Amino acid sequence: MSGKIRVLVGKPGLDGHDRGAKVIARAYRDAGMEVIYTGLHRTPEELARMAVEEDVDVVALSILSGAHGTLIPRFIDCFKKEKGTQDLDVLILAGGIIPEEDIPALKTAGVDEVFGPGTSTETIVDYTRSHLKRPVA
Amino acid sequence: MSFERPLPGPARSLYFRLPEDGVYIVGDHAAQSALELFEGLIQGSRPHLSRAISVVENGAPGAAELLSHAYKARKGAHITGITGSPGVGKSTLVDGIVREMRKAGQTVGIIAVDPSSPFTGGAILGDRVRMGQGHALDEGVFFRSLATRGHLGGLSRHTGDVIALLDAFGFDQIVVETVGAGQSEVDIMKYAHTVVVALAPGLGDDMQAIKAGILEIGDIFCVNKADLPGAERTRRDIEMMLDMKEPAGWRPPVVRAIAVNGEGLGDLVSEIFRHRSYLVASDTLKEKKRWSYTAVLEEYLRLLTVAKVLESAARDGSLDAALDDLMHGKAGPMEAALNLLNKYRT
């Protein structure tokens, strides 16, 4: 099929730093994907609505505020509710300043992978491509 | 009829890009899920609507069935197009227009188009960045970003079909934001009942205003960033251009706006509603719709004809033969195309 991989690059919460998110957005673009960038200060509810409306294959959340433990699980709950399913077929990635010890809890909440500072964009793009959860329409 | 199969041989990479061009595949296995998607969206399910848009955009199995249901279920939304150069404030204007339309009790579906990279096919769809918090969670608003995927003219090839889906879903208003348009991205006029051309001060003098192209298609002009120097000049240049036109039924108004703080957007939306009333009262709406369907039908005929001829010609080798003739100077391109067309037309 001729579909494109669609990615929502999101910035949840009160965090004004989006250089990282833009670098990731650009890397996905250069890898031939369609990237919807949400802009800053989005609530988990807003991000969930956007991810549904844009019918994305991947959600990549960038968060540097330290609130990942609250915002990301809440996003996943909202997303399931908006999609009307407990069984998400969307790859969920997180990046930013996330301490090692917080990662297991995020994964339990439904995050597929967490990328810390210094991860190369190639690694992220390759991971994304090879872990999609549904065939691209 | 199926164009799903890629062609064998060298012709494929060069010429046969049909799936990407969105020729739809009709098949039994696809029909069921298409019907499911359609029934979901007609009952107001947003996940079904957004999935349906992807199916149509990708020309995935079932798209043809889905669309034939959707077109029959259209409810007659008013379609407004917003176009203009990059950076004049289209996204911010759209955000404000949606806010005003919601105030007027109208539900709104939004399609925002951004360009795909000619190199990688990727895209950054950034129109959501300007969407305010106000209606980000509003049930009466639906927003979808589309990439051009190589289509010229300022829109995605599937814009008309996505409009049909939103219309079947039942939005009162559909707002389409084009890519940052230069002078000749005028596809929006095929789909919109009301075209708003957005301008900003400082982007050219009255010479720009008399050129052909985008400035000819405005039903409403909006001079955004009206607090910047030169706004009055821009307004006057447009008025002057409009003065030179033969007076016809509708004189496009020129609205001043400062989209970032919402100034003038109430006026802009009033003008959109007034234009709608004019179109209905003067019976121009019907004419517009007919004209628009002519353009769409023409596009599909072209796509399907090209697909059919290419597939047949590639299969029996006439495509290669025609290419050989061209390479050896035995025929001109138009002659070769005409021969192929005549051979496979029936």
Image (cartoon, rainbow, N blue to C red):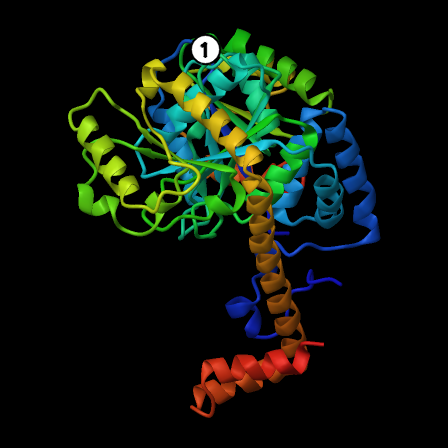
Whole-percent x, y for residue B32 in the image: 83, 42
**Residue placed most toward the observer, A52 or B172:** B172
Compared across the picture, whether A61 is left or right of B300 comes to left
Image point (41%, 17%), residue name: B266
Whole-percent x, y for residue B197 in the image: 37, 36
Chain under label 1? A
Identify residue type, mark 1: Gly
**Residue placed most toward the observer, B172 or B164:** B172
Q: Quadrant of residue A39?
A: top left
Name the residue carrying label 1. Answer: A13
Asked whether residue B323 is in view, the answer is no
Q: Is residue A61 above or below residue A99?
A: below
**Residue placed most toward the observer, B241 or A125:** B241
Compared across the picture, whether B228 is left or right of A83 comes to left
Q: Is residue B153 above or below residue B275?
A: below
For disc 1, the neighbor class at 10 Å (few under 14, some 14 to 19, many from 20) is many
Image point (61%, 25%), residue name: B172
Image point (72%, 25%), residue name: B45
Q: Is residue B262 above or below residue B207?
A: above
Asked whether residue A125 is in view, the answer is yes
Quadrant in the picture for the C terminus of chain A: top right
Label 1 sits on a secondary structure element that is: loop
Image point (53%, 69%), residue name: B15
**Residue placed most toward the observer, A14 or B223:** B223
Whole-percent x, y for residue B186 in the image: 42, 48
